[in-house]
Image: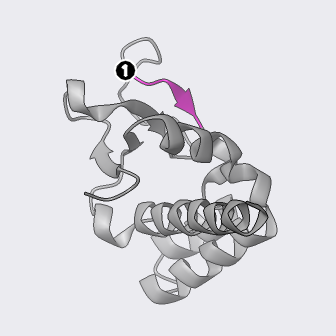
Amino acid sequence: MARYQIKFKRVYDAPAATDGVRVLADRLWPRGIKKVALAHDDWCKDACPSHALRQQYHAQVIDWPTFAQAYADELAANPTSLTPLLAYARQSTLTLLSAVKDVEHSHLPVLKQAILTRLEDDNEELDHHN
């Protein structure tokens, strides 16, 4: 079994007991959902793509590989944006919630990889100090 469990779920899907910590990973609040109606533990806007990058991708000015690399670069430039997500992933299953239709070609896989990479880097650093 993987050391960390990070999964994706659309905000319109019903919550499950296996979701663990549920974090909204969209910069904008999802249309048609009241804030009190969404079962979520946190909303990590700072870890989401910038408005400009999101708009370029949605307008098809850039393709998915270009978007993914640019978003990874944004995350690398703002490492503290991942801090709450790292803590959640260490304690439980982390479910990243989004309103996107095509989860696999969204920011979620990039965000998941950034979280996993940081967790592994942190673990290696701890191993070297022990």
Q: Relative to the observer, which residue lies in front, 45 or 90?
A: 90
Give the magenta range. Answer: 39-43
Q: Is 103 positioned to the left or the right of 21 in the image? A: left
Q: Amino acid at mark 1?
A: Ala
Q: Secondary structure at mark 1?
A: loop
Q: Relative to the observer, which residue lies in front, 98 or 3?
A: 3
Rendered residue at 50%/45% (across/down): 25
Identify the image quadrant of residue 42.
top right
Residue 48's x, y, as percent? 60, 54
Identify the image quadrant of residue 3.
bottom left
Residue 36's x, y, as percent? 44, 11
Above or below residue 101? Residue 85 is: above
Above or below residue 80? Residue 107 is: below
Identify the image quadrant of residue 123.
bottom right
Residue 51's x, y, as percent? 66, 59
Q: Is 4 positioned to the left or the right of 130 in the image? A: left
Q: Quadrant of the C terminus?
A: bottom right
The main secondary structure of the magenta stretch is loop
Q: Is residue 59 at least partly visible in the picture?
A: yes
Rendered residue at 35%/54% (across/down): 100
Q: Residue at the far top: name it.
A: 36
Residue 92's x, y, as percent? 42, 35
Rendered residue at 38%/21% (across/down): 38
Q: Is residue 15 at least partly visible in the picture?
A: no
Above or below residue 31? Residue 10 is: below
Q: Relative to the observer, which residue lies in front, 68 or 5?
A: 5
Q: Quadrant of the N terminus?
A: bottom left
44 in magenta: no
Q: Is 40 positioned to the left or the right of 42 in the image? A: left
Crowd rating for badge 1 (residues with CA inside 10 Å; few <14, some 14–19, many 20+)? some
Above or below residue 125? Residue 17 is: above
Identify the residue under disc 1: 39
